[in-house]
Image (cartoon, helix red, strand yellow):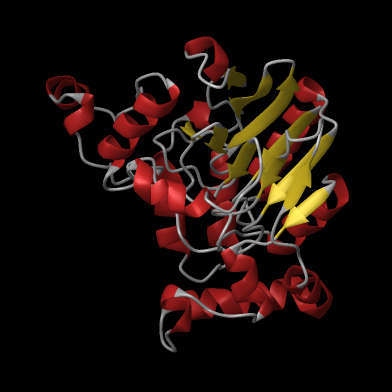
Amino acid sequence: MRVAILADIHGNLPACEAVLEDIARSVSPDYIVAAGDLALRGAHPRETVDLLFDRCDSVLMGNTDCYLAGNYLGGAYREKDHWKTELLRWTRDQLGGALLEKLGALPFSVRYTPRKGQDLFVCHANPRNLEESLDPTLDDVAVRRFFSHLDAAACAFGHLHFPYRRRVGRMLIADVASAGIPRDGDLRPAYGVFTFTPKGWRVQIRRVRYPVRKATQALTARRVPGGPLLVHKLVEARYRHHNALMEAARRHSGLPPPGPVLRPPPGAASRAAATPMNSRPSPEVDPASLPTDLDGTVTGAAPLPLDALNDFEG
């Protein structure tokens, strides 16, 4: 059995299309799952949600899907005068009542059972709720509390937008990261492929190229509330504590060292060469200055072969 899982698409239609195309062309899974956060923060919420409902065997609920549906609100979306409140209203208008109702009725999780006692459990953030991130820097005690009740051999989730895998006792867990707004220093959308073998579940994280500039220009052209900040987050592609996350992810899952994703602007090569990559701050990126190869050719589409790097899952 093979299950392809994409999460945190966030209305980024060009990225979603690229991921689904790669799944169809290179993976040919038995099932495709969209693991929540489908629409909010992107320029094409309706088109993205329609595509996911059409192409996926299961579509799960994420925290932002709950915000849109009106099930509850979290964070700054509860603040009356915050730009996120305006973004929420705009996205709801784009989706319309029928799709909002479908989002509000989405299931929390789905299971796949290739053999008795070998379930794959798929959810958005963690097996207990939609809000808490399974950060790779969490210690074993903190992580285990999310899984103590779960009877499964493997668990796939997203929410953090940062790919890694880990063992929790005998259970293989993996963040399949984000198909819409990656935050691990790599602009390419990520998704996960879980394959059941005679040795149990194995996971692979695949990265694909897509037209980044098309996504950023759409945020501006469609006057998405908070557009400039959303564009910045899309091309920044990392958290402030990126180094700590990357170190923990590599320790758990054998991820390779991070490499540069964005080429430095003209005249900055000497300064970049003098500064070690791990100590550089997150770049301030003008989307108009994105290099040509980011407009449709963000490095070649290729899997990240975690199994070959570290045969961790057994």
Left or right for 117, reference 77: right
Q: Residue at horizontal 64%, vertical 52%?
A: 123
- In screen coordinates, is 51 left or right of 179? right
Residue 95, quarter of picture = bottom right
Residue 285, quarter of the rendered image = top left
Q: Looking at the picture, how far across and down is residue 110, in whole percent?
A: 75, 51
In the rendered view, tell whether residue 264 sits above or below residue 14.
above
Placement of the C terminus among the 4 image quadrants: top right
151 horizontally vs 51: left or right: left
Depth check, front residue: 247 or 240: 247
Residue at left 79%, top 76%? Answer: 101
Look at 69% across and 35% down and name the residue there.
Answer: 19
Give the image location of residue 47, x and y in percent. 76, 57
Q: Is residue 253 visible?
A: yes
Which quadrant of the view contains residue 68?
bottom right
Q: Which percent across, then down, holds residue 280?
A: 20, 34
Q: Nearer the viewer, residue 192 or 68?
A: 192
Residue positioned most to the bottom: 80
Residue depicted at x 45% and y 33%? 186
Residue most extreme to the top: 308
Residue in the foreground of this view, choosing between 212 and 66: 66
Residue 134 visible? The answer is: no
